[in-house]
Amino acid sequence: MGNDILVLAEQRGGRLHATALQLVTAARELAKATGGQVLACVVGHKVSEAAGKLGADGVGKVVAVDDASLELYSPLQYTTAAAAVIEKTAPKAVLLAATFMGRDWGPRLAARLKAGLASDCTEVKIEAGAVHACKGVCNGKAIAEFKFDPARPAIISIRPNTFGAAAAGDGSVASESVAFSAGDGDDRVRTTEVVSTSSGIKDVTEADIVVSGGRALKSEENFKILEEMAQVLDAAVGCSRAAADAGYQPHSRQVGLTGKTVTPKLYIAFGIDGAIQHLAGMRGSKTIVAVNTKADAPIFQVANYGLVADLFQVAPVLTQELRKLKDL
């Protein structure tokens, strides 16, 4: 294996996914330790615009695999395309996002290349020439560390929003196109159509503002208080693990080490004490506002603004005032 680090960037409909430039940041850290360069790869159809945006600060080369058969994600064809790039570039590590696509793509690549895989990781590093990756296990009570065989590429999926997005480059990055050649049996599984079933509710990992609630909300019905505020702010609704476990909100909205990592511009926490695993999932937020009746709640230690008060009194009034400001 060489010393380069390869980023497999997701695209949806020709648009680069937000995680792509986050992976570049992680890859740069590894490349500094290996002495190699960061390579970025995008697979799909009509991906020239997405490939151009991959020329971020620190990226040495962008590789594009563009073919009409790759317009929609196909597990076998995308694996064949990425494997060809990996075999050609011989990187020390391959990074991809721990998204729904990445959770399918990563294991298939590892099996195809007979390489090691670590998924949903929050840290990557080089020690004694070997690639290491870390992730939380046992509901965040412990950290598992994986060491990869230097003779094979290390395949690592990174939890979204763990790293900040790399800054845009000057557009002078080298680029290369790799022709796609389907493997035998790749047509056994084909994606013929993608139908969106979105309810219009923002995902906590992609929203600029997250309004989050804890077990103190006491019921699913009471979460409507936060949903009203989120609607005014065009925000996503999040929750703590305790609230999700109690059935007040689906686990897809859970923020924390065992849920989703978020880095919004504004994170408003109502009735969340701030357990270690929850703080790990939201402390990267630009501005944190906390409302809690417990003056010694750990969340106040990371909050930019804190209010010791009853959320049931504060939230409706705040929503009302925000609505007034919006109508101005």
Image (cartoon, grey):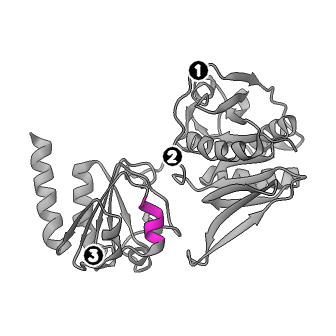
Q: Residues within 10 Å of mark 3 (few under 14, many from 20)?
A: many
Q: Is residue 212 left or right of residue 164?
A: left
Quarter in which the N terminus is drawn: top right
| Residue at horizontal 11 percent and vertical 56 percent from the top | 320
- Residue 280 is a magenta residue: yes
Task: Give the SS element for disc 3.
Answer: helix
Residue pointed to by mark 2: 164
- Above or below, 216 against 80 in this view is below
The correct choice, above or below, for 120 with respect to 196 in the image is below
Whole-number angstrom distance, CA of label 3 to CA of label 1? 49 Å
Viewer-proximal residue, 222 or 240? 240
Position in image of residue 111 (x %, y %): 84, 55
| Left or right placement of residue 309 versus residue 50 in this view | left
Secondary structure at badge 2 equals: loop
> Viewer-proximal residue, 231 or 167?
167
Q: Is residue 52 left or right of residue 242?
A: right
